[in-house]
Image: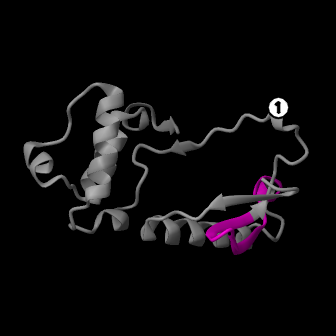
């Protein structure tokens, strides 16, 4: 946060970066003409480089509130938090395996298969389905990250 702007680090994973950028561009364009949610959607100013790192630059909607009084939640809604198109790749990924391994440690349950442990990788479809099943997403239809 700097002044009235919020600089969100650009996601490192290419698919997350493209999805998030596309969402920000679409939501800002679709909210221009009388959309009731317009007051709750930040203006998106594109990507900027700061100190060698890339960020999404957008309005800070909480600028009017003091830093001490801010409480922000990232809410995911739906019984499944990913689109079918996101789950198409069958390419095993070590980064997703490592994230799930950390999630296993936090939750104290074993969900990775022996084959995933042997290869130290998993597909994105498997990771997303597991993540949703281990959270309140599949049971309650939402989760808070």
In the image, 39 versus 123, the foreground residue is 123
Q: Position of residue 55 (x, y in %)?
A: 65, 66
Instruction: Provide the secondary structure element on which disc 1 rests.
Output: helix
Horizontal relation, residue 118 to residue 56: left or right = left
Can I make out residue 27 in this image? Answer: no
Can I make out residue 67 in this image? Answer: yes
Among all residues in the image, which is located at the extreme right?
Answer: 64
Classify 60 as above or below 109. below
Q: Position of residue 118 (x, y in %)?
A: 9, 49
Where residue 21 sits, quadrant-wise, is bottom right
Label 1 packing within 10 angstroms: few (<14), some (14-19), many (20+): few
Q: Tell me, what colour scheme is on the image?
A: one colour
In the image, 54 versus 38, the foreground residue is 54
Which residue is located at x 18 percent, y 52 percent? 120
Classify 101 as above or below 2. above
Among all residues in the image, which is located at the extreme top?
Answer: 108
Q: Is residue 48 magenta?
A: yes
Report how many numbered discs are placed on residues in the image: 1
Query: Start and end of the magenta stretch?
Result: 37-57
Among all residues in the image, which is located at the extreme front?
Answer: 51
Which residue is located at x 71 percent, y 60 percent? 7
Q: Position of residue 51 (x, y in %)?
A: 68, 68
Q: Is residue 127 magenta?
A: no
Which residue is located at x 31 percent, y 53 percent? 96
Classify 14 as above or below 115. below
Q: Position of residue 20 (x, y in %)?
A: 56, 65
Where residue 24 sits, quadrant-wise, is bottom right
Residue where numbered disc 1 is placed: 69
Which residue is located at x 30 percent, y 43 percent? 100
Horizontal relation, residue 22 to residue 139: left or right = right
């Amino acid at each position: 946060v700097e002044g009235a702007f919020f600089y969100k680090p650009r996601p490192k994973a290419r698919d997350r970066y493209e999805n998030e950028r596309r969402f920000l561009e679409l939501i800002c364009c679709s909210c221009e003409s009388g959309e009731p949610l317009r007051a709750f959607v930040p203006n998106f100013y594109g990507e900027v480089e700061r100190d060698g790192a890339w960020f999404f630059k957008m309005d800070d909607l909480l600028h009017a509130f003091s830093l001490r009084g801010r409480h922000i939640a990232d809410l995911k809604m739906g019984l499944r938090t990913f689109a079918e198109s996101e789950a198409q790749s069958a390419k095993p990924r070590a980064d997703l395996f490592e994230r799930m391994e950390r999630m296993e440690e936090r939750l104290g349950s074993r969900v990775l298969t022996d084959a995933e442990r042997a290869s130290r990788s998993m597909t994105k479809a498997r990771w997303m389905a597991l993540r949703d099943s281990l959270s309140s997403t599949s049971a309650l239809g939402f989760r808070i990250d």
